[in-house]
Image (spheres, helix red, strand yellow):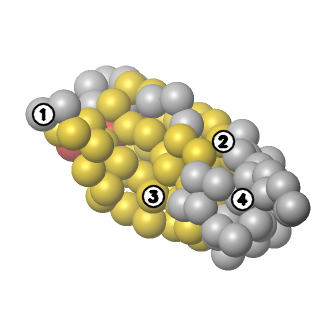
Amino acid sequence: SNVVITVTPSISATLRQGPAGIKDYITVSTTAARKGDVVLFQVLQNGTWVTFKQGTLNATGKVTIAISATKRQGQEIQAVLLATKVHGAATSPPLTVPPPA
């Protein structure tokens, strides 16, 4: 009998504040994921995670998006790596968008 092992990648999201408090940048880093894999960016709204943006990983397993620092301040955001044939899905710990710098 075959044993199927599903690899669950590690995923993390970091936020870098942009100049003048207009935009912030969220970078997602993964392991065991591949270029072109899809990452969903979700915001917590009324207790439900809602996707507001989608990105694809580059050759180093990362993707960066820009968000509005003013519109998103105080919101919780997480990144979700969608499952593929090669690995399972993974969700980053949520991060809170700080007030504009």
Q: Examine the image and state in which quarter residue 92 appears.
A: top right
Which residue occupies 12% across, 34% down? 46
Q: Position of residue 30 (x, y in %)?
A: 72, 48
Please give left or right for residue 38 compared with residue 76 in the image.
Answer: right
Which residue occupies 87% across, 61% down? 1
Q: Where is residue 24 in the image (x, y as percent from the top left)?
A: 44, 43
Q: Tell me the kind of residue under disc 2.
A: Ile
As measured in the structure, the alpha-carbon distance from the residue carrying label 2 to the one carrying label 1 is: 24 Å
As measured in the structure, the alpha-carbon distance from the residue carrying label 2 to the one carrying label 4 is: 12 Å
Foreground residue, 13 or 15?
13
Q: What element carries label 2?
A: strand
Relative to 75, residue 18 above or below: below
Mark yes or no: residue 22 visible. no
Location of mark 1 (residue): 46
Location of mark 4 (residue): 87
Q: Where is residue 88 in the image (x, y as percent from the top left)?
A: 65, 54
Mark 4 or mark 3: whose residue is earlier in sequence: 3
User: Farthest bottom residue?
Assistant: 36
Location of mark 3 (residue): 40
Location of mark 2 (residue): 11
Q: Tell me the kind of residue under disc 4.
A: His
Foreground residue, 26 or 23?
26
Which is in the foreground here, disc 2 or disc 4?
4
Please give left or right for residue 78 compared with residue 63 in the image.
Answer: left
Tell me the crowding category of disc 2: few under 14, some 14 to 19, or many 20 or more residues within 10 angstroms, Cα based. Answer: many
Q: Examine the image and state in which quarter residue 54 appears.
A: bottom left
As measured in the structure, the alpha-carbon distance from the residue carrying label 1 to the one carrying label 3 is: 18 Å
Q: Examine the image and state in which quarter residue 59 appears.
A: bottom right
Q: What element carries label 1?
A: loop
Q: What element carries label 3?
A: strand
Mark 3 or mark 2: whose residue is earlier in sequence: 2
